[in-house]
Image: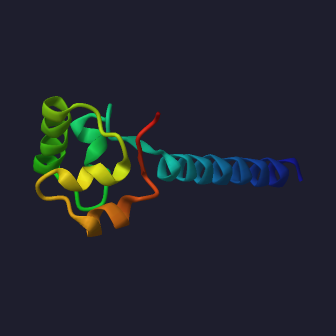
Amino acid sequence: MKMKTWMITLTAALFLICCTGTAAWSLDKIDINTASSEQLTRLKGVGPKTAEKIIEYRETNGMFKSPEEITQVPGIGPKTLENNKDLIIVPK
């Protein structure tokens, strides 16, 4: 009986760890003013080259004032913004 209780407890703990880790990662917001190239590639439709363009844009033009401003970066259009609107943040 003790072995069965231990296995149930272990299974429940592993399930919670897996679910919490996945949920936490998927809810992470990306601050496009401070994100690294690697972090920016987590955005849908943004590969390494586009991530570098985002960084170049903010270095040349200053910090983004709104998430919508990312569409000024060559290669990022309204569709990319729409696909990532819940991930992109620009803190005030």
- Check the image and name the residue furthest to the right: 1
Residue nearest the observer in this picture, 63 or 14: 63
Image check: 49 left or right of 71? left
- Residue 76, percent from left and from top: 19, 59
**Colour mapping used in the image:** rainbow
Residue nearest the observer in this picture, 82 or 40: 82
Indicate the quadrant where residue 53 lies.
Answer: top left
Q: Residue at x 10, y 48 (%)?
A: 49
Q: Is residue 10 above or below residue 55?
A: below
Image check: 79 left or right of 24? left
Q: Residue at x 21, y 64 (%)?
A: 77
Residue nearest the observer in this picture, 49 or 8: 49
- Residue 78, percent from left and from top: 27, 66
Residue nearest the observer in this picture, 25 or 86: 86
- Count of picture labels: 0
- Residue 19, percent from left and from top: 60, 54
Q: Residue at x 18, y 45 (%)?
A: 51
- Residue 3, percent from left and from top: 81, 49
Q: Residue at x 52, y 52 (%)?
A: 22
